[in-house]
Image (tube, helix red, strand yellow):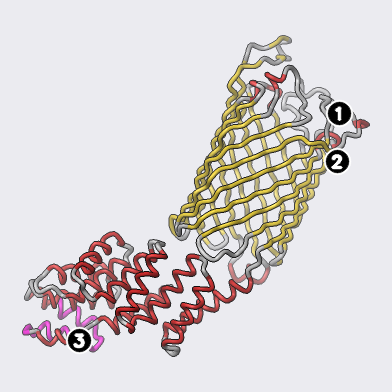
């Protein structure tokens, strides 16, 4: 991108500057500085023009040419200082507005640039050039529609801006996802001067657009299978006194899933993606109580405003559990898959592109859970788990290097349950790190190898006090408001040995602390397997 801006800068240089006024100087130092500048002896020009300004601080021409020399050497702060003098002193140098706005634009001082832009527009100073710079500023602010209008106006006012304007219009359409229109504008930029450097860059972007149009596949399929070992499939309580009779908690597991993602190419700012996922969990020791099947559907229509994208997220998940309502399921019960849980969620999310490496996402929604075939003790008004309530989160993603990222997330949820013992609110904090382990040249040869670390803590506070059998005391407890703290962590490796497949291995730990002992447990899982993508 720096090269492209350099080409555009050279182009502007060739069409903006008007040097006849340079010969109107009576200051020998200024005359010598202008001569050195025109001969591209920029260091000598700066040295001479600094002396010229010291000799005559009121010379707007000396300030202008010195500002231009600093700009050509990429000394933007000094260029800004002198160009501001050039538009403040008398007589005012009209060309200085163009150069000052460009210098402020390159330093991302967009608000200040727009102030000088408004003055130049009101005084009708070099309208075509000012319109072009206005388009650049609007494009950087992701106001693509207004930017295109400004570039079109620049073309109408001065045909010499047509090639650069068409190039930038192509960039604006690319940002909007209007690839067909982007290709047309880039082609116009090329045909106006096919041998120019700008045409060369337009061809490169046209190739990118053509490739994106041809290779875009709206449907993606992901299939995975992971075998593993679980030290506590049934969440046996940590205290053996509360886990009496719960045996064979360890066993082999198999997690498998298939996901279909649908992301159509939509010309313009509208967004849409959808997915369907089928997932299965089976184990070797408690197949009649803990094997499960899940089917999920997710829809997310949205709108892209540039640096901000808004989506409406809609989700539904159906869990089938191999179970029955008996509190203790015997091995010969032949329990089949039964409808266990329906989960619904809806809510908007707002995603902010803070800069090229930082993304912030905010979500606020509503969840609903409907249970079937529950294992419960006592009346429904105490133990029925059906619930609904709000949920929201704030997420930050830092793309700190190619193929590496850090994600931190804070989430809040409320479950208003039909059974008062299950009314609770919770706070969850999680972190995820993916770090590439191989140098880029090795990754190109052998495949990307990433270290993946996760960690989290989830604190749930239950609203109503409940009693439980206190085994050490041999008596019923006083009403206790349950509080669970779940902490988890994992470490894994992901090796993308083929563009369509990865090998993944992971070790994870989960622990729950609770003031009601039967809810406390620890669990370790180890798994490895393959993920295939197409």
Q: Is residue 175 above or below residue 528?
A: below
Residue on which the image places disc 2: 284
Q: Dominant secondary structure of the magenta stretch?
A: helix
| Mark closest to the chain's N terminus, 1 or 2 | 2
Give the residue displayed 70% in from the left and 49% down from the top. 506
| Mark closest to the chain's N terminus, 3 or 2 | 3
Q: Is residue 195 above or below residue 398?
A: below
Q: Position of residue 216 (x, y in %)?
A: 63, 68
Secondary element under disc 3, as helix, strand or loop, is helix
Q: Position of residue 139 (x, y in %)?
A: 39, 66
Residue on which the image places disc 3: 36
Q: Position of residue 123 (x, y in %)?
A: 18, 69
In this view, the mark in front (1 or 2)? 1
Give the residue displayed 62% in from the left and 52% down from the top. 452
Which residue occupies the foreground of this view, 152 or 287?
152
Residue on which the image places disc 1: 329
Q: Determine whether, in the image, residue 374 is placed left or right of residue 414.
A: right
Answer yes or no: do the residues labelled 1 and 2 have beta carbons within 8 Å? no
């Amino acid at each position: 991108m720096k090269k492209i801006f350099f080409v555009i800068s050279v182009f502007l240089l060739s069409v903006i500057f008007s040097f006849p006024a340079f010969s109107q100087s009576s200051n020998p130092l200024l005359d010598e500085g202008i001569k050195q500048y025109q001969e591209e002896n920029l260091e000598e020009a700066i040295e001479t023009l600094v002396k010229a300004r010291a000799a005559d601080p009121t010379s707007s021409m000396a300030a202008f040419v010195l500002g231009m020399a600093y700009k050509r050497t990429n000394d933007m702060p000094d260029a800004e200082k002198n160009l501001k003098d050039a538009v403040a002193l008398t007589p005012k140098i009209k060309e200085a507005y163009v150069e000052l706005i460009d210098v402020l634009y390159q330093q991302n001082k967009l608000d200040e640039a727009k102030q000088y832009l408004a003055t130049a527009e009101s005084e009708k100073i070099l309208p075509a050039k000012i319109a072009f710079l206005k388009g650049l500023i609007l494009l950087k602010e992701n106001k693509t529609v207004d930017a295109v209008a400004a570039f079109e106006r620049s073309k109408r006012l001065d045909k010499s801006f047509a090639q650069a304007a068409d190039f930038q219009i192509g960039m604006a359409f690319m940002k909007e996802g209007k690839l067909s229109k982007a290709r047309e504008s880039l082609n116009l930029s090329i045909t106006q001067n096919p041998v120019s450097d700008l045409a060369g860059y337009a061809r490169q972007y046209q190739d990118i657009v053509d490739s994106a149009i041809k290779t875009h596949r709206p449907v993606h399929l992901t299939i995975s299978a992971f075998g593993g070992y679980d030290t506590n499939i049934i969440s046996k309580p940590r205290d053996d006194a509360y886990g009496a009779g719960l045996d064979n908690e360890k066993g082999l597991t198999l997690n498998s899933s298939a996901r279909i993602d649908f992301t159509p190419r939509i010309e313009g700012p509208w967004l849409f993606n959808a997915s369907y996922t089928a997932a299965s969990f089976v184990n070797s020791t408690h197949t009649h109580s803990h094997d499960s099947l899940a089917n999920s559907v997710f829809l997310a229509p949205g709108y892209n405003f540039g640096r901000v994208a808004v989506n409406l997220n809609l989700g539904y998940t159906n869990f089938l559990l191999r179970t029955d309502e008996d509190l203790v399921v015997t091995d010969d019960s032949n329990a089949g898959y039964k409808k266990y849980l329906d989960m619904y969620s809806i809510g908007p999310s707002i995603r902010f592109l803070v800069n090229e490496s930082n993304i912030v996402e905010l979500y606020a929604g509503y969840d609903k859970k409907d249970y079937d075939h529950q294992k419960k003790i006592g009346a429904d008004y105490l133990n029925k788990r059906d619930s609904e309530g709000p949920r929201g989160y704030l997420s930050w993603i830092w793309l700190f290097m190619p193929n590496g990222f850090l994600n931190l997330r804070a989430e809040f949820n409320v479950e208003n349950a039909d059974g008062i013992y299950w009314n609770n609110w919770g706070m969850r904090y999680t972190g995820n790190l993916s770090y590439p382990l191989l140098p880029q040249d090795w990754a190109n040869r052998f495949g990307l190898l990433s270290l993946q670390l996760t960690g989290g803590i989830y604190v749930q506070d239950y609203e109503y006090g409940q009693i439980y059998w206190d085994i050490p005391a041999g008596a019923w407890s006083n009403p206790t408001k349950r509080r669970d703290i779940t902490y988890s962590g994992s470490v894994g490796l992901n090796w993308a040995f083929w563009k369509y497949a990865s090998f993944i291995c992971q070790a994870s730990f989960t622990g729950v602390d609770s003031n009601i002992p039967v809810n406390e447990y620890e669990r370790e899982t180890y798994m490895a397997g393959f993920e295939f993508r197409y």
